Amino acid sequence: QLQELAEVAGVEGESLSAELHAAARSDGATKLAAENRELLDMFRRDTMDYWRSFETLEHFLQQPGLLMDQVICQIPASQLLWMVDKYYTLHDDVVRELLSKKLSASARHRLDDVSETTGVPLRSCRRQFDNLRRIHTAFEDNARHGFQCYMRDEIMAGWLLSESLAAKYTCVLFLFHSGFKVSITRQGRGALKKDVVRCEDFEFFAAALLNYWVRTDVNVSSIADRITTDDATFMQLKAGLGDVYGFELDKLFVTSLREIKNLVFNVRDPALQQLWQLVRQRISGAGANGSNKKGVFYETSPQLASNQKKMRALEQGRAFRTAAKGLVSIGAGLAQLKEFRDLFEDANQKVVEPLIEAGLNSADIAALLSATADAFGDLD
């Protein structure tokens, strides 16, 4: 337990003096001090030894492939793997701040503000930055496949990370690789403010995009089953990362989205009107019992369907028309790098804000998007 405490302190950027102080204040040390001063001194020496062991192993932790073969410190393999996972742990608050930066040398010199904002020691912020940049650079410099590989599994194999931590790195690295704009500064009733869009939210988005926009073997008609952001859904999406190959969008998928805009929404209002009727039926569950003609489940919302004020705002206030056109416009622009990087901001401005202005809450929006995703397949 003392060894683990010292190793965690080293990873988190705590100083040796701070660790000795914490060790001296522990229940075990207090009891030793009362019984035997020599044992207390031994307790402190052990803490220093474990600390030095961590400093010695840090070089190998940065290159986990060499860790199991090192002979400097005789530590069980299970303990070494535990140390690797701790060393590569990512703090959500730190990652959220780093996402607005680039993984560059100049950005590393400006991590003081990240430490000050998050309350995480600067050494720990640098460790997390360096780990992200180290793994990102390794794939970037790989002449054989680059990022076109089974990323999660490659990270697990190359850095000895657990499946859950490798999934987290896959999501975060995808966000960095894609260059998404995440520093939203616009103000307004529905604006995405930096402090309310959490790291977990962006991870969920990344996992969903990788599952549905990069992976090619997913049945898109089942997307309505995963439209919500609960923990079970997130676990399913992260589990699916093992089947995701690379970070590039599926070209056939992107082409199809562009064709939808050209073939459907250039025919004026009839297509939109038909889409609204299909969505309205699905929201209320009328005549479908919560599933489409293929038997795929979608989310109904009797609460939204029975709220006449919201339904009128969607239909007569043109909120649904605006949101639907926004969705198609975003999809059609995915092939352009700039449009892709603006994805989060565009989704908020063109889709979410009009629905919020119509009085919808998050549950209403989830139900509406679920029904819309399903209804597209039944358009004439």
Image: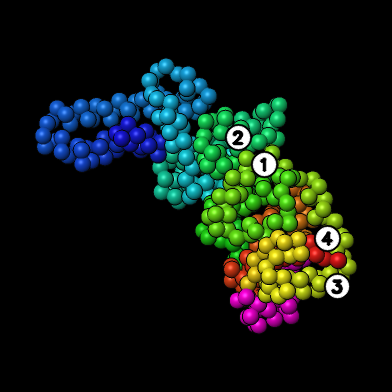
Q: Mark 4 to mark 2: distance in Å?
A: 36 Å
As drawn, 317 above or below 324: below
Which residue is denoted by mark 1 in the rendering? 244
Residue at x 69%, y 39% (from the top left corner): 245
User: Which kind of residue does numbered mark 2 sit on?
Assistant: Asp
Lower position in the chain sequence, tag 3 or tag 2: 2
Residue 309 part of the magenta-drawn span:
yes
Is label 1 in a helix, a strand or a loop? loop
Quadrant of the image for the N terminus?
top left
User: Which kind of residue does numbered mark 4 sit on?
Assistant: Lys
Lower position in the chain sequence, tag 2 or tag 1: 2
Q: Magenta residues?
A: 302-326
Res. 270 mark:
3
As drawn, 244 above or below 328: above
Q: Mark 4 to mark 1: distance in Å?
A: 27 Å
Lower position in the chain sequence, tag 3 or tag 4: 4
Res. 153 mark:
2
Is label 3 in a helix, a strand or a loop? helix
User: Which kind of residue does numbered mark 1 sit on?
Assistant: Val
